[in-house]
């Protein structure tokens, strides 16, 4: 990783390198510090969030507990008050049909006293529904019978469980649909506690049931902030009280997660994580549960962390700007020296840096200016030397024979030979004149492929005139290929190798093909000569690619690579990596050379 960073830094200026390095040295320690801080405070934030959740849950639990304690108080009051207890036991034994008028009046007064006592039982200033139901069907309520018939309690499924309760044990009945007509419109659910009434012989003579509206319990949930969700559940995680009435009676959504071994109070879901807290409710076996999005639970602590981060970031920005200003001031002479060097690179050698500081940058600037002075002096000396050299060369050229004189003489000889009727010799002299003119003409570095074919055609004609057995030269070139530009004398060395070494100056056939396909230029030269074996071909290819074939080497078959090496080198110099040469040969079956110019690879 460090090597990659160092390689990238090398492409920047010195000033940018210093600034980037300084930033890296500042940012990395800051990131490491923040990471360590975040890691170390993660558990602390969770503990604090749990503490906050438990505190809120405890406050709500105290509120709910107060309701249930008052309900138990009402039950205990009915069971333990001696006056009420004696009246209830007496009335439970009486038979209404056998009571005379005097006893009936006394019974009325007693019943009136019980009704007044239970009428005054309240919960936190709110009315509770108290029902005393005797075995003989007689009942006492603090509500009208028209609102609810107490004898219907005998039909409730939980009522039979009261006969199995002993002592002061009670049965808590979770949320059920409200049975009181006056409450059904506004309070759909109710919560009750029931206990059997026993005499001295532990025989049940009656029952007491205290009921409150579930709406009173959920008041503890309504003041919760944000998205926190609180509810009351029983031992099987059935929801007894919830701010949303539709969820009452359903099972707690994350029941399976919270019952897993090793549960860490974090409920993980695909959407987000939740913080789970619970608080048991005394006497009932029920539990108060809260579920809060974890992000919201740690919001306050996280906001403090963000404030610290923002403070550090602002300090970093201020320090970075100060550092950048100082570095720019310190590196300003270097930037100026770099601009001077760029100007010199463009060819202006008269510019000078003129930095007068006494530090290392000033010394470098002074040395750079002295170097420019020395270069200017050397240029003047070289210019004078070149002037003298050109004068000497001019004198030498004046002593040479003008090449045009030679071409004119050859043309004169060709005309005389033609007048004597020797057309074959005249054509040979014409071909020689063309080749000689192309060889001497240095102005033509690049020629069209058409001109190159004319040259090689004249060359084959000359070779056929000097050999006893003629070579058949077949040309198959497309119109687009004729217009391609190539270095001159590219085909001639390859044709020469085919005639002299491939065909051994004997009769044979050389085939030249050229075409353009998808803007790429292809040239193929094939002969039917002696060819090369695999070892010789491999050695030839290695010499060709390693540029070691410039030393004259001739294989057993007589095929020389010196001319082809020259062609390969010049084509590579002209077209670069866009040029490729492929040599194929088989012993006794000839040799084929393919040259390709892939113009898509050429740099613009």
Image: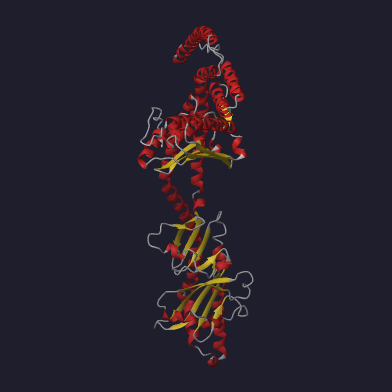
Give above or below for 284 relative to 474.
Answer: below
By what rule are the colours in the image chosen? Answer: secondary structure
Question: Picture coordinates of residue 423 (x, y %)?
Answer: 59, 28
Give above or below for 479 relative to 136.
Answer: above
Give above or below for 51 relative to 521.
Answer: below
Q: Is residue 478 left or right of residue 95?
A: right
Answer with the quarter of the image where residue 203 lies. Answer: bottom left
- Residue at far bottom of view: 98
**Taking the image as drawn, is residue 557 in sight?**
yes
- In the rendered image, the quadrant that contains the N terminus is top left
Front residue (pair 237, 461): 461
Labels in figure, total: 0
Question: Picture coordinates of residue 270 (x, y %)?
Answer: 50, 57
Answer with the quarter of the image where residue 487 lies. Answer: top right
Front residue (pair 440, 380): 440
**Taking the image as drawn, is residue 25 in sight?**
no
Q: Is residue 126 left or right of residue 529?
A: right
- In the rendered image, the quadrant that contains the C terminus is top right
Question: Picture coordinates of residue 271 (x, y %)?
Answer: 52, 56
Front residue (pair 30, 98): 30
- Residue at far front of view: 420
Front residue (pair 139, 416): 416
Q: Residue at x 44, y 62 (%)?
A: 257
Q: Residue at x 48, y 24 (%)?
A: 14
Give above or below for 586 relative to 186.
Answer: above
Question: Picture coordinates of residue 248 (x, y %)?
Answer: 54, 68
């Amino acid at each position: 990783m460090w090597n990659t960073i160092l390689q990238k830094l090398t492409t920047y200026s010195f000033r940018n390198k210093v600034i980037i390095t300084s930033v890296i040295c500042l940012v990395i320690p800051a990131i490491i510090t923040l990471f360590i801080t975040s890691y170390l405070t993660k558990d602390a934030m969770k503990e604090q969030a749990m503490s906050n959740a438990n505190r809120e849950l405890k406050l709500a639990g105290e509120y709910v507990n107060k309701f249930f304690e008052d309900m138990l108080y009402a039950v205990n009051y009915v069971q333990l008050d001696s006056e009420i207890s004696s009246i209830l036991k007496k009335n439970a034994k009486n038979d209404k049909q056998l009571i005379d008028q005097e006893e009936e009046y006394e019974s009325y007064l007693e019943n009136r006293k019980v009704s007044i006592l239970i009428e005054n039982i309240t919960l936190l200033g709110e009315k509770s529904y108290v029902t005393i139901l005797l075995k003989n069907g007689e009942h006492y309520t603090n509500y009208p019978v028209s609102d609810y018939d107490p004898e219907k309690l005998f039909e409730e499924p939980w009522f039979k469980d009261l006969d199995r309760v002993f002592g002061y044990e009670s049965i808590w009945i979770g949320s059920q649909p409200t049975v009181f007509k006056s409450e059904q419109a506004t309070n759909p659910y109710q919560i009750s506690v029931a206990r059997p009434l026993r005499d001295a012989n532990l025989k049940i003579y009656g029952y007491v049931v205290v009921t409150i509206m579930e709406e009173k319990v959920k008041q503890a949930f309504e003041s919760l902030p944000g998205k926190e969700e609180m509810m009351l559940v029983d031992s099987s995680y059935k929801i007894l009280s919830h701010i949303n009435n539709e969820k009452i009676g359903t099972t707690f959504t994350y029941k399976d997660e919270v019952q897993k071994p090793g549960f860490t109070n974090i409920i993980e879901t695909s959407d987000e994580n939740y913080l789970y807290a619970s608080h048991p409710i005394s006497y009932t076996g029920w539990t108060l549960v809260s579920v809060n999005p974890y992000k919201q639970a740690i919001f306050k602590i996280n906001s403090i962390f963000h404030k610290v981060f923002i403070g550090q970031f602002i300090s970093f920005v201020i320090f970075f700007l100060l550092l950048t200003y100082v570095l720019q001031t310190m590196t300003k002479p270097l930037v100026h020296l770099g601009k001077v060097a760029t100007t010199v690179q463009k060819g202006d050698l008269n510019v000078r840096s003129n930095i007068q500081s006494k530090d290392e940058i000033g010394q470098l600037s002074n040395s750079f200016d002295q170097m420019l002075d020395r270069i200017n002096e050397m240029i003047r000396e070289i210019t004078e030397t070149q002037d003298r050299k050109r004068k000497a060369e001019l004198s030498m050229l004046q002593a040479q024979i003008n090449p045009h004189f030679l071409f004119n003489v050859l043309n004169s000889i060709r005309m005389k030979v033609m007048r004597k009727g020797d057309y074959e010799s005249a054509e040979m002299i014409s071909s020689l004149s063309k080749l000689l003119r192309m060889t001497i003409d240095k102005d033509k570095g690049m020629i069209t492929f058409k001109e190159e074919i004319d040259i090689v055609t004249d060359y084959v004609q000359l070779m056929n005139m000097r050999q006893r057995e003629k070579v058949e030269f077949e040309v198959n070139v497309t119109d687009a290929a004729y217009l391609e530009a190539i270095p001159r004398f590219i085909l001639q060395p390859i044709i020469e190798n085919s005639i002299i070494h491939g065909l051994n100056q004997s009769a044979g056939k050389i085939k030249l093909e050229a075409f353009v396909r998808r803007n790429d230029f292809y040239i193929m030269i094939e002969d039917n000569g002696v060819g090369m074996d695999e070892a010789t071909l491999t050695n030839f290819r290695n010499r060709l690619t390693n540029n070691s074939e410039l030393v004259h080497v001739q294989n057993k078959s007589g095929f020389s690579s010196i001319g082809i090496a020259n062609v390969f080198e010049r084509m590579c110099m002209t077209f670069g990596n866009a040029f490729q040469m492929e040599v194929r040969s088989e012993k006794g079956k000839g040799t084929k050379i393919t040259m390709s110019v892939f113009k898509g690879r050429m740099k613009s």
